[in-house]
Image (cartoon, rainbow, N blue to C red):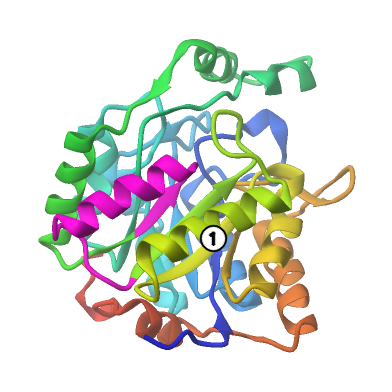
Amino acid sequence: MPKSRKVIITCAPTGAIHTPTMSPYLPVTPDEIAAASIEAFEAGAAIIHLHARDPEDGKPTQDPAVFRKFLPKIKKETDAVINITTGGSPHMTVDERLRPAAEFAPEVASLNMGSMNMGLFPMLRRYENFKYDWEVEHLEKSRDMVFKNTYQDIERILTTCGANGTRFEFECYDTAHLYNLAYFHEAGLVKAPLFIQTVFGLLGGIGAHPEDVTHMKRTADRLFGDEYVWSVLGAGRNQIPVASISASMGGNVRVGLEDSLWGGPGRLAEGSAEQVRLARKVIEGLSLEIASPDEARDMLDLKGGDLVTV
């Protein structure tokens, strides 16, 4: 299958890694999440990858009732592809994590392709005071925790969401996750085109050196040939450098405050739309074009927004 020269920008405006203390720009309430998503779409994002937070304290939640407060607004104001997390938070059970994607049947759902150590605890050294007690507990627990994504967990998400016509953003934090995906592909539980999001720079996963990026790309090429669409996200300060490598190699990019809080050296981004614009400058500086939502739907063989339950 020929690879398009258009570059898909995915934007993740909030998530489960960062906490409210870390940035005043991190969207927490449903209205803030909706506004950040709409702004990212207007800046050029074709796909919006969504988490939810308790509007009272910013704690990650997979309660479908909270998603229901912002999904209709995003659908009304944009034509973006909606991508709902099944990763949720490492502290949740797979049943908790699965609930919103199962209920709303989005065009895309994220799916972590293996268990891993996810070390968030080094962030504790960067902040002296936290707004909420749960933030410290959330980070400290990652010192002795495995983010569980067993083969049984993965198959449960694949079969539950796949029955609704949802396709997947396969999040691969290391080469072993690519091999796990290859197993499910060979078993016939997933079908091409595979949307593979390779993740770089999180403690517990592969690093963000350019050789790490090319190693993941070479491995995916060998395992999947032309049956996949490649995208990357770089954590923290690695966001734009990793995105630049991907775009220059024919790949796609993901940005957003879920993955990085930064808009430049030592400067917080004032929103995910700012990061979308930075990624767009890189893409257009390479004489490439960004993909529209409908072009992304075509590249990923999605069912269409009219078949989403919101």
Residue 187 lies, in percent from the top left, at: 14, 55
Q: Which residue corresponds to mark 1?
A: 217
Residue 189 lies, in percent from the top left, at: 15, 57
Question: Quick one: quadrant of the C terminus?
Answer: bottom left
Total numbered labels placed on residues in the image: 1
Which amino acid type corresponds to the residue marked 1 in the rendered image? Lys
* Residue found 69% across the figure and 23% down from its top: 123
Q: In terms of depth relative to the viewer, which is nearer, 85 or 242?
A: 242
Q: Is residue 128 left or right of residue 223?
A: right
* Residue found 63% across the figure and 33% down from its top: 20
Residue 207 lies, in percent from the top left, at: 65, 40
Q: Is residue 11 visible?
A: no
* Residue found 60% across the figure and 36% down from its top: 202
Q: Secondary structure at mark 1?
A: helix
Q: In terms of depth relative to the viewer, which is nearer, 60 or 45?
A: 45
Q: In terms of depth relative to the viewer, which is nearer, 262 or 35?
A: 262
Q: Give the magenta range.
A: 169-193
Question: Quick one: quadrant of the N terminus?
Answer: bottom left
